[in-house]
Amino acid sequence: MPQGETLEALRARGGQLLSVDVNEVTSDDITDVLDRHGVRGTVVYGGVTDIRGRQLGTLTYRIDADRTVVAAIVDELSARTRAVLLEDAAPTAGARR
């Protein structure tokens, strides 16, 4: 997850920042969740490595949506992996560590 000056620079560009662990879900799964909620996300930080055919890493997305929609996205992702809304600065309820 971005920290320090990098995080501040990302925040300065607006939108909400959502970091998601890519392990139990793939980047395609994350995109599907965003699409179901009518939200377009842009990866602004992170990376994914393929280890033996499995994606592992963390991706931070910039999303622009109503807080209620963002909360629903975080809840849905948190049921399967760790999802952190960076403005909250702490893992969301139900998130795995």
Image (cartoon, rainbow, N blue to C red):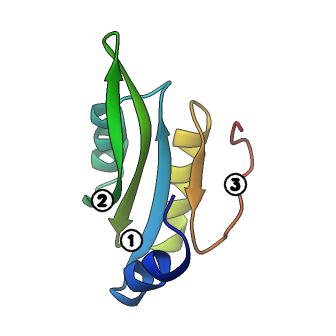
Q: Upstream in the sequence, badge 3 or badge 2? A: 2
Q: Is residue 65 above or below residue 52?
A: below
Q: Any mark on residue 39, and which?
A: 2
Give the crowd class for mark 1: few <14, some 14-19, many >=20 residues within 10 Å.
some
The three-letter amino acid code for the residue at tag 2 is Val
Indicate the amino acid at tag 3. Answer: Pro
Q: Which mark is residue 65?
A: 1
SS at mark 3?
loop
Residue 31 in which image quadrant? top left
Question: Is the residue under label 1 in contact with that under label 2 (CB below 8 Å)?
Answer: yes
Q: Measuring from the top left, give residue 13's x and y in whole percent.
A: 33, 86
* Image coords of residue 27 (percent x, y): 31, 36
The vertical placement of 51 against 73, above or below, is above
Taking the spot 54% from the left edge, 66% from the top edge, the residue there is: 68
Q: Position of residue 87 (x, y in %)?
A: 59, 75
- Residue 43 lies, with reference to residue 56, above or below; the image says below
Please name the residue that numbered disc 3 is placed on: 91
The answer to whether residue 9 is left or right of residue 87 is left
The residue located at (30%, 38%) in the rendering is 32
Given the image, on which type of amino acid does mark 1 rest? Ala
